[in-house]
Image (cartoon, coloured by chain):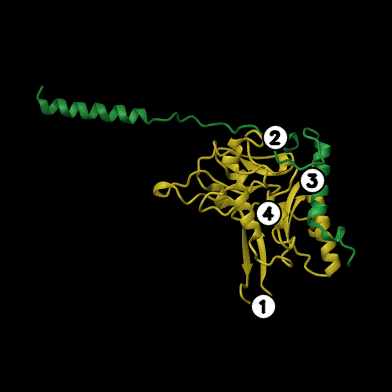
Amino acid sequence: MALQTWRVVGLVALGLVVGACGEKPQEGKARKSDVSAYQGGGSSDVAPGWKSGDAASWEAQMKSRAQYGQNEYTRSSAP
Amino acid sequence: MARMKFICDAERCIECNGCVTACKAENDVPWGVNRRRVVTLDDGVPGEKSISVACMHCSDAPCMAVCPVDCFYRTDEGVVLHDKDTCIGCGYCSYACPFGAPQFPSNGTFGMRGKMDKCTFCAGGPEANGSAAENEKYGRNRLAEGKLPACAEMCSTKALLGGDGDVVADIFRNRVMMRGKGSEVWGWGTAYGKPAGGEVKR
């Protein structure tokens, strides 16, 4: 075959190879499961006053933090 | 289990944008996304009202209902989260949300939307709590540290309340009783539904 034809074939083959290298699998990913917040985690900056893994103590911590931090009527005696 | 909610007290909000800044800093929010923003009505006019708006973590979330790949889920605490690895960036959730919470980064090439990003109630996402992967994708997981969202905790006037729904509703009710006005809570009915019979609970 002529040199020109071989060049065309070579370029097409190169294009197919390069295109195939960039292909990513297209199957949809199912949603991952999550861990509950009261389980705690790997953070080193954890608020004191509750126990990791204990849902009741975590809930109590959330409630008391909300009352103390966001309700100034519990902290001041002024009406 | 505690049901997490946000209330923004429009009588107290001074449009300082402290909540916006706290959220951006705490969660390393990407460019073009404002997980939380302050909306001001009648800006510049005496009597203007400001309200801090982010994801309301609705009881019957429209974003969750319309997502074609079902990437949303609700935690036991009522926080609406999503899986960015499943998200296809279609934008349906952004259209569906009445609060404009789901947003897309603006730095995509050729106008590509990328993955949806929104307020997580500082509860991270479906990765290990406190892990680097969770921090990179979803921001800080403050709930797993026993803390409340950064925006609510940083609010300078405590206009923005966030936490257990019973507690924040009680705090807000107490305020309304004390000052005798301002009982409407914008967005509450849309996010959490109106009480049966249409009566407003005091």
Q: Earlier in the sequence, mark 2 or mark 3?
A: 2
**Amino acid found under the numbered disc labelled 3:** Met
User: Which x, y percent locates residue B199?
Assistant: 81, 60
Regarding mark 2 in the picture, which secondary structure is present there?
A: loop
Q: Are marks 4 and 3 on the same chain?
A: no
Q: Quadrant of the C terminus of chain B?
A: bottom right
* Chain ID at mark 1: B
Q: Are marks 3 and 1 on the same chain?
A: no
In the image, which is nearer the foreground, mark 1 or mark 4? Answer: 4
| CA distance separating discs 2 and 4 | 21 Å
Instruction: Please tell me whether residue A62 is drawn above or below residue B98 in the rendered image.
Output: above
Label count reads 4
The residue identified by callout 4 is B151
Identify the colour of chain A in the image: green
Q: Are marks 2 and 3 on the same chain?
A: yes
| CA distance separating discs 2 and 3 | 16 Å
| CA distance separating discs 3 and 1 | 37 Å
Contact between marks 3 and 1 (CB within 8 A): the answer is no
The residue identified by callout 1 is B46
